Amino acid sequence: PQFAILKDEAFANPLRVNYEVNFSIDDQIKSIRNSFKISYLNGEEAVMVMMIVCYFDVAPESWKEMTQKNGNIVIPAGFLQHLATVTLGAARGAQFAKTEATNLNNYTIPLMNLTELVKNDMVVTPNVSNK
């Protein structure tokens, strides 16, 4: 993971947490990439930022089920939410390990409803090359 502690002190106010979740695919190797960026803010100032990325291989028969006749790949929102849950769990562990012996170790990634972050199916039109 990419991880930065920008300020390590006792904070008078509760820290605010911002999230950014993204997905992409690699049609050649049948995998889904999920990235989670988590920023802790004291007011408007970032005090800790983390980016974690997980890659998930998809079985060929499952990839085929997600591929439509027109070539588009449709990944159901529920499946994306499940992958995001795994990535978020990895982020929690990484944050705990990286903040050991700092004031920021007292802060944990709050519980979140991933159905609110990931609401829609992902529809991808693969690039077609004319080689």
Image (tube, rainbow, N blue to C red):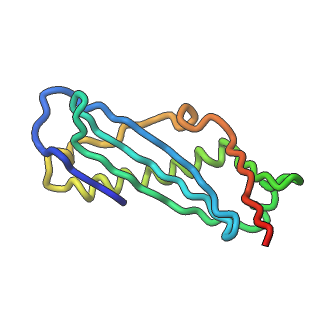
Residue 88's x, y, as percent? 45, 49
Residue 118's x, y, as percent? 58, 38
Taking the view exactly as shown, the residue that stands out farthest to the right is 69
Image quarter in which the C terminus is found: bottom right
The residue lying at 33 percent from left, 35 percent from top is 17
Taking the view exactly as shown, the residue that stands out farthest to the front is 131
The residue lying at 25 percent from left, 30 percent from top is 44
Residue 120's x, y, as percent? 66, 37
Taking the view exactly as shown, the residue that stands out farthest to the bottom is 131
Residue 111's x, y, as percent? 41, 37
Instruction: State left or right for residue 13 relative to residue 125.
Output: left
Instruction: State left or right for residue 95 relative to residue 91.
Output: left
- Viewer-closest of 100 and 66: 66
The residue lying at 56 percent from left, 58 percent from top is 33
The residue lying at 84 percent from left, 52 percent from top is 68
Image quarter in which the N terminus is found: bottom left
Count of numbered circles on the image: 0
Residue 13 vertical position relative to residue 23 in the rendered view, above or below: above
Q: Quadrant of residue 106?
A: top left
- Viewer-closest of 68 and 76: 68
Residue 122 vertical position relative to residue 33 in the rendered view, above or below: above
- Viewer-closest of 124 and 107: 124
